[in-house]
Amino acid sequence: MYDKASIALIPSGFKSGVVDNLYSVLPSNGNGDFNHSRSSHATRVNKDGLIESVGYAPRLDYTGNVDCPHLLLEPNRTNLVTDSSGGLYGNSPASEILTTAPDGTNTAVRPVPDSSSNRYEYTISGNTYSTDTKVTYSWYRKRISTPNNTQYIGDLLFNVLVNCTQIGSATQISTNINGYDRFSATFNITDGSQLTRVRAYFGLLIGTGNSSIAYWGHQLEEGSYPTSYIPTSGNAETRTADSCNNAGTSAEFNDSEGVLFVEIAALADDVTSRRIAISDGGGSNRLEIFYSTASNNRISFQVRSGNLLEASMGYNVTDITNFNKVAVKYKQNDFQFWINGEQVGTDNNGNTPTGLNTLRFEDGLGGNDFYGKCKQLIYFNEALSDSELQTLTS
């Protein structure tokens, strides 16, 4: 089956330059390589399980699987915490010890309590936002022993000082980053005309003379979900958005029939449009796989020919933040939609797109960039059988 593929991206390597080339396995002549760009440094989890900066390069991220990386593409975000490894502590314990952090440096903080201190406080810098803006706070924690104060979720209780409310509870979002787990909590701004400030209370063991927990990587960003760690040291820092586009030429694509297959995970189920498209470069003819704005956990596809909608389907999966295997087969009057080993939709009436010549992590029109994770992206320049599509997506 794979000998029918004309483009195969299985994230494994890149070449740095003015614009970084993200290598595709196929074709061997380089036509399938993607142009990746990001105008700032960014971090990833490497194959040794440590957080590291990769400069401006594409991020092959090993979070959750040290044997198999995925391509990580994220939107523009700013860490408003000005000292992400340390911080401004309000009611500090007697002393602090520095210890090994998720990036391997000796910068994580172990607060040492005394007989009068059962917590330490991390004050998140104030800022002003528009009303109903979402902001997310995240942090890394390594539990050395169990704190005796069980009211702290992830060893944390938020004290909202000014005009914002917490949405849901704090949640664990990753595990075992050099022995640390990462947690996050999201807030809604109720009055954007005032300064917003949050103080985090971290629970400790009382009077033991030893630190029970180490903390690191404090991050506050505007948005409804956390993104990868943005280090700061004295000032807020911005990680600019990733773009990854322009793989393929007309030689790799077939206007008459083919299959686009992706294995992808969303950064959040936030009902925003994030797309991957084969197109003619202008968008009048295109095939797109995308996370839909129609409902939660929905994956969709559409086909346009001469800017007329020829086929369109959607399917709700259990969780779009998990990796899902998705394939779309297109052929004259024969469109099929497959997800995780099952055929979830068919359409037997429609024309195929023409002039296909580029594959992009966006909608083919320069918008709706795909922000998420991608383990595989394969294009076949002929239609596959039902049994092949089942095997491909299982």
Image (tube, rainbow, N blue to C red):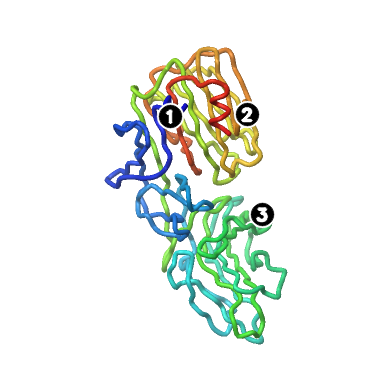
**10 Å neighbourhood of mark 2: few (<14), some, or many (≥20)?**
some
Residue found at the far left of this picture? 18
Q: Nearer the viewer, residue 342 or 80?
A: 342
Q: Position of residue 108 (x, y in %)?
A: 49, 71
Question: In the rendered view, does 76 fall on the left or right side of 158?
Answer: left
Tell me the distance, in whole angstroms, between the alpha carbons under discs 1 and 2. 27 Å
Q: Is residue 259 visible?
A: yes
Q: Residue at x 29, y 47 (%)?
A: 16
Q: Position of residue 12 (x, y in %)?
A: 39, 44
Q: Nearer the viewer, residue 64 or 116?
A: 64
First of labels 1, 2 by sequence position = 2
Tell me the distance, in whole angstroms, between the alpha carbons under discs 3 and 1. 35 Å
Q: Which residue is mark 3?
A: 167
Q: Nearer the viewer, residue 385 or 273?
A: 385
Query: CB of mark 3 within 8 Å of CB of mark 2?
Result: no
Q: Position of residue 69 (x, y in %)?
A: 46, 48
- All told, the count of numbered labels is 3
Q: Amino acid at mark 3?
A: Ile
Q: Which residue is mark 1?
A: 364
Query: CB of mark 3 within 8 Å of CB of mark 1?
Result: no
Q: Which label belongs to residue 235?
A: none
Which is more foreground, mark 1 or mark 2?
2
| SS state under label 2 | strand
Q: Position of residue 99 (x, y in %)?
A: 49, 74
Q: Residue at x 55, y 53 (%)?
A: 226
Q: Amino acid at mark 1?
A: Gly
First of labels 3, 1 by sequence position = 3
Which is more foreground, mark 3 or mark 2?
2
Tell me the distance, in whole angstroms, between the alpha carbons under discs 3 and 2. 35 Å
Q: Which residue is mark 2?
A: 342
